[in-house]
């Protein structure tokens, strides 16, 4: 198995969920499970654009640099840490995965799906052991709560 999945119904309008994923100042408050946080974010919202976050975890800084592969407004965002902006290859990728975020309208808010595709089953197992489900679910909770403050 090389794919990890997360599916949730977020009680927030799809437009706000999209904005929280695509605007750096709206990504920073929720993207990293608390008490950790994002100190910097850069999103060049185009295929080949940079998708960068700098996370502070217990005082240590972790840069996460990658590229957007697909941007379908309000519907789909695909990014990877296997490439840098303008599709430049990464010498040493982080977790080595591509994330596919899909948003759909739902009567309660947003049907929110994340698919994390990894190069190998070992990479997927490592990401899962690091807390993929717990971390991405916590971030989704934080996204939902933060988006409610914007409504």
Image (cartoon, helix red, strand yellow):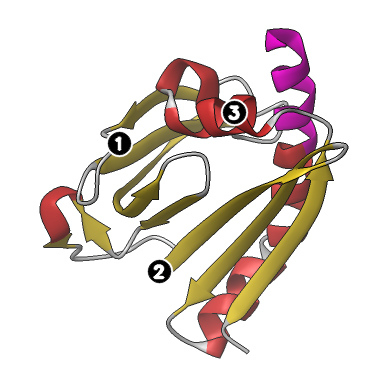
Q: From the image, give the main secondary structure of the stretch colored magenta.
A: helix
Q: What is the distance, in whole Å, between disc 1 and disc 3 at their CAs?
A: 15 Å
Please tell me which of labels 2 and 1 falls first in the chain: 1
Eyeballing the image, is 115 above or below 111?
A: below
Q: Which residue is mark 3?
A: 15
The residue located at (59%, 66%) in the rendering is 115
Q: Is residue 58 visible?
A: no
Q: Are marks 2 and 3 in contact (CB under 8 Å)?
A: no
Q: Nearer the viewer, residue 72 or 25?
A: 72
**Picture quadrant of residue 146:** top right
User: Residue 96 bears which disc, if any?
Assistant: 2
In the rendering, at what x and y percent does residue 81 appear? 35, 58
Front: mark 1 or 3: 3
- Number of residues whose C-alpha sits closer than 10 Å to that of mark 2, classed few (under 14), some (14–19) or many (20 or more): some
Asked whether, in this view, residue 100 is left or right of residue 143, the answer is left
Graded by Cα atoms within 10 Å as few (under 14), some (14 to 19) or many (20 or more), the crowding at tag 3 reads some
Q: Nearer the viewer, mark 2 or mark 3?
A: 3
**Residue at point 60% right, 19% down?**
29
* Residue that numbered label 1 is attached to: 45
In front: mark 2 or mark 1? 1
What's drawn in magenta, residue-wise? 141-151
Residue 142 is inside the magenta segment: yes
Mark 1 / mark 3, whichever is N-terminal: 3
Q: Is residue 118 visible?
A: yes
Q: Residue at x 76, y 59 (%)?
A: 7
């Amino acid at each position: 198995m090389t794919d990890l999945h997360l599916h949730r119904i977020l009680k927030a309008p799809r437009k706000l969920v999209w904005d929280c994923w695509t605007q750096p100042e709206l990504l920073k408050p929720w993207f990293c499970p608390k008490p950790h946080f994002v100190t910097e974010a850069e999103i060049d919202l185009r295929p080949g654009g940079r998708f960068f976050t700098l996370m502070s975890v217990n005082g240590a800084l972790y840069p996460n640099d990658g590229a957007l592969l697909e941007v379908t407004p309000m519907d789909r965002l695909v990014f990877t840490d296997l490439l840098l902006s303008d599709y430049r290859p990464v010498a040493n990728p982080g977790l080595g995965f591509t994330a596919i975020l899909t948003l759909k309208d739902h009567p309660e808010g947003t049907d929110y799906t994340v698919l994390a595709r990894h190069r190998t089953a070992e990479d997927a197992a490592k990401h899962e052991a690091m807390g993929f489900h717990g971390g991405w679910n916590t971030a989704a909770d934080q996204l939902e709560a933060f988006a409610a403050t914007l409504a």
